Amino acid sequence: MSFIDATLCASLKIIRALHEEENLFEEKGIGFGGDRSLNIDLIAEKIFIKALSDYGNILSEETGFIDNGKEKKIIIDPIDGSYNVSNHIPYFGCSVYLENEAAIVVNLSNGDYFVKDKNGKRFDNLFRKPFASNYRHDVIIFEKAYKNPDIVQKLSTRGLKFRAPGALSLSLCYGESSKAVIYKGEIREFDIAAAKFYNSEYHWHFEDDLILMSPKKEDLEEVLSIIKE
């Protein structure tokens, strides 16, 4: 089984666990990444560790580094958007990155998945033909908007539409069909490694607490200039 197939099979097991396991939202302390860990985070992590340990050492948001005696490193966020899933908001996923080789980000709420490896990129769905649209590229995805009212005001003044869904790795992947993606807050490797690899051909801007990504250079420059006003 390939690394990508193993990851997608693990994702399906996590989706099944979401419907069958009990006490999913019981708090289990603070994970390695600094966020609260829910039982579903640990269940998902356990599934990934079992499925992927043969492919590399694992750095997980929940447990930290797991040495499997391999040369490659795998970076995983078992549940991206835990707050969403615990509040029945259908926008949450998982993020898996095999160092310099492959990235898989799965929307566990609807089956959409994003894959990139040596064969290129693909967007598909675990259950059906993926939803298609004539993308307008006129909406900004703004993660952590609620913590950045100054930027919200600047975007609103310019009449720019934005959404704040609440799962960064998913947003950075869906961002290939948006005007731009903005994230302002603590930057962690778990949240961005897979999505950065998936959309590496696009335009990125990084600062200590700011990420900006856009398919078009002129859109990135426009949004960055607004943020910096």
Image (cartoon, rainbow, N blue to C red):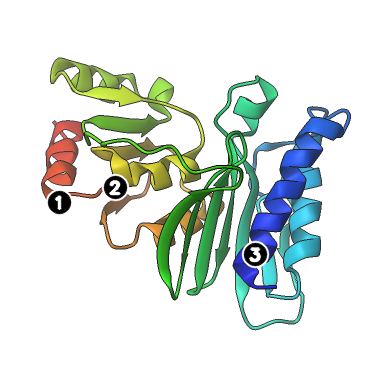
Residue appearing at x 69%, y 75% in the figure: 55
Name the residue carrying label 3: 5
- In space, the residues marked 2 and 1 are separated at their CA atoms by 9 Å
Q: In which quarter of the image is the C terminus?
A: top left
Please give the label number shown on residue 152: none
Determine whether, in the image, residue 162 is placed left or right of residue 66: left
Which of the two marks, 3 or 1, is nearer to us in this view? Answer: 3
Nearer to me, 143 or 172: 172
Please give the label number shown on residue 217: 1
Q: Quadrant of residue 138?
A: top left
**Mark positioned earlier in the residue sequence (3 or 1):** 3
Image x and y of residue 6, in percent: 69, 64
Q: Which amino acid does label 1 sit on?
A: Lys
Local crowd size for mark 1, using a 10 Å CA cut-off: few (<14), some (14–19), many (≥20):
few
In the displayed structure, 140 sits above or below 14; it is: above
Local crowd size for mark 3, using a 10 Å CA cut-off: few (<14), some (14–19), many (≥20):
few
Say whether marks 2 and 1 touch (CB < 8 Å): no
Nearer to me, 48 or 71: 48
Q: Is residue 170 visible in this depiction of the protein?
A: yes
- In space, the residues marked 2 and 3 are separated at their CA atoms by 28 Å
Nearer to me, 134 or 142: 134
Which of the two marks, 2 or 3, is nearer to us in this view? Answer: 3
